[in-house]
Amino acid sequence: MSLESRIKRAATMVLTLMLVMLIIAIGEYLQPLQDLDTFLREHASLTRALQAVAIGMAILGTLALAGAQFLPEPRPPAGLSRAELEAHSPPMEYAEAAEGGSREFEGAASFAAVKQAWRLRSWRYARKWRILFFMMGGAFLLSVGLFGLICVIAPPGIKLLFGGALLYALVRIGWGFAQA
């Protein structure tokens, strides 16, 4: 790595840290976030309930991500073979291997292929799509659960940072699907 690229990388890191610190500082002074923080501190039972929901979502998401590989092979509808179903399924880079007693899944699909697979209900008949959709649901639950937990228990500046990051990620994913 050249000196110039190291300097650019360091400058990018410093600017990113400055932006994060600025967002946290702004969050500490925003009245609505201060009011939310005060409300949550005053209503401990609500805070505990929100924490329980967020932790539950995170645990469920983790189990879905970890357990997706154990989903059974779906049965094809009567009259259709596996080859015919695969021919009608959207393309996906997919590999499943068993090495030394452990199973491994690798898959990649574009937003357009995921939308098409959902419309065609490929998850009902193709294991690769069933696994992908199950894992996507698990990743969503895990992300919202963890970010939600942080937004419940953190001070106002951190709430703004993590809430904004979650909102940004959800908007970008939604935008990607809308454009596909």
Image: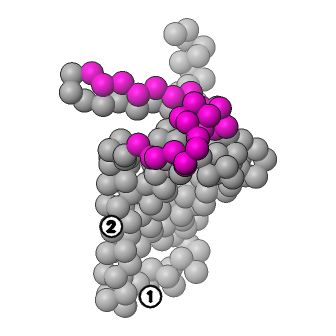
Of badges 2 and 1, the one in the foreground is 2
Front-lying residue, 90 or 180: 90
Front-lying residue, 65 or 142: 65
Report if residue 94 lies within the magenta region.
Answer: yes
Q: Position of residue 112 (x, y in %)?
A: 71, 41
Residue 35 placement, left or right of 51:
right
Above or below residue 33? Residue 44 is below
Q: Which residue ends up furthest to the top in the rendered image? A: 2
At horizontal 40% and vertical 32% (from top left) the residue drawn is: 105
At horizontal 30% and vertical 31% (from top left) the residue drawn is: 103
Q: Position of residue 80 (x, y in %)?
A: 58, 41
Residue 69 placement, left or right of 84:
left
Report if residue 33 lies within the magenta region.
Answer: no
Residue 84 showing in the rendered view: yes
Residues rendered magenta in the picture? 73-99
Q: Amino acid at mark 1?
A: Phe
Q: Position of residue 130 (x, y in %)?
A: 49, 47
For the image, the number of numbered tags is 2
| Sequence order check, earlier mark of 2 and 1 | 1
Q: Are marks 2 and 1 in contact (CB under 8 Å)?
A: no
Circle 2 crowding by C-alpha within 10 Å: few under 14, some 14–19, many from 20 = some
Scheme by which the image is coloured: one colour
At horizontal 53% and vertical 76% (from top left) the residue drawn is: 33
Residue occupied by mark 1:
39
Residue occupied by mark 2:
55
Circle 1 crowding by C-alpha within 10 Å: few under 14, some 14–19, many from 20 = few
